Amino acid sequence: MYQQMIFVNLAVNDLDASKKFFTELGYSINEQFSDETAASVAISDTIVAMLLTRQKYAEFTKKEIVDATKSSEVLLALSAESREKVDELVEKAVAAGGSVTGETQDHGFMYGRAFDDLDGHTWEVIWMDPAAVQG
């Protein structure tokens, strides 16, 4: 069965530092689709973050590329299998040079935290109780 994928393209200031950041979170770099201007980060079987140098990113748009530390371009949200996994990923991000952003959201059936990566892109990590999702 076909599974639709998402490729999130992000402009980064320092490709090597960004690759190191995401590998420290436990993700792998797919070298087949990476070079000196881009890195393909496999987040899951269906989610890929394409880290692009600002020059490479500019080849795909005529729009101004925002500075994600000053302007919000997108909020990225990843699911986690437990509350503990939410905390674990955020703690890895902080240890790798990212920063916690926003307040912890704890609604009992849903728990989430967020971090900014090295370039200021905001990543939310959310757990939802499967029983609440099923209704």
Image (spheres, helix red, strand yellow):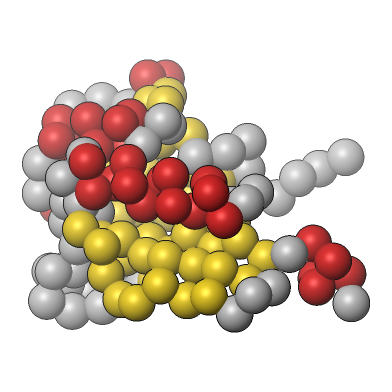
Does residue 128 sit above or below 31 in this rendering?
Answer: below
Query: Would you say 132 lies left or right of 121 here?
Result: right
Image spot of residue 91 (x, y percent): 33, 47
Image spot of residue 11 (x, y percent): 22, 54
Q: Residue at x 53, y 49 (%)?
A: 84
Q: Evaluate whether residue 13 shows in this view.
A: yes
Identify the image quadrant of the N terminus: top right
Does residue 95 sit above or below 117 in this rendering?
Answer: above
Query: Would you say 27 lies left or right of 92 here?
Result: right
Q: Quadrant of residue 46?
A: top right
Image spot of residue 66 (x, y percent): 16, 71
Of the pair 111 and 120, the residue shown nearer to us: 111
Q: Evaluate whether residue 58 shows in this view.
A: no
Identify the image quadrant of the C terminus: bottom right
Q: How many marks?
A: 0
Does residue 19 sit above or below 57 in this rendering?
Answer: above
Q: Residue at x 26, y 25 (%)?
A: 35
Q: Residue at x 38, y 26 (%)?
A: 29
Of the pair 98 and 41, the residue shown nearer to us: 98
Q: Residue at x 47, y 76 (%)?
A: 105
Does residue 29 sit above or below 85 in this rendering?
Answer: above
Image spot of residue 101 (x, y percent): 26, 69
Query: Would you say 61 lies left or right of 2 here?
Result: left
Of the pair 85 and 23, the residue shown nearer to us: 85
Q: Quadrant of residue 31?
A: top left
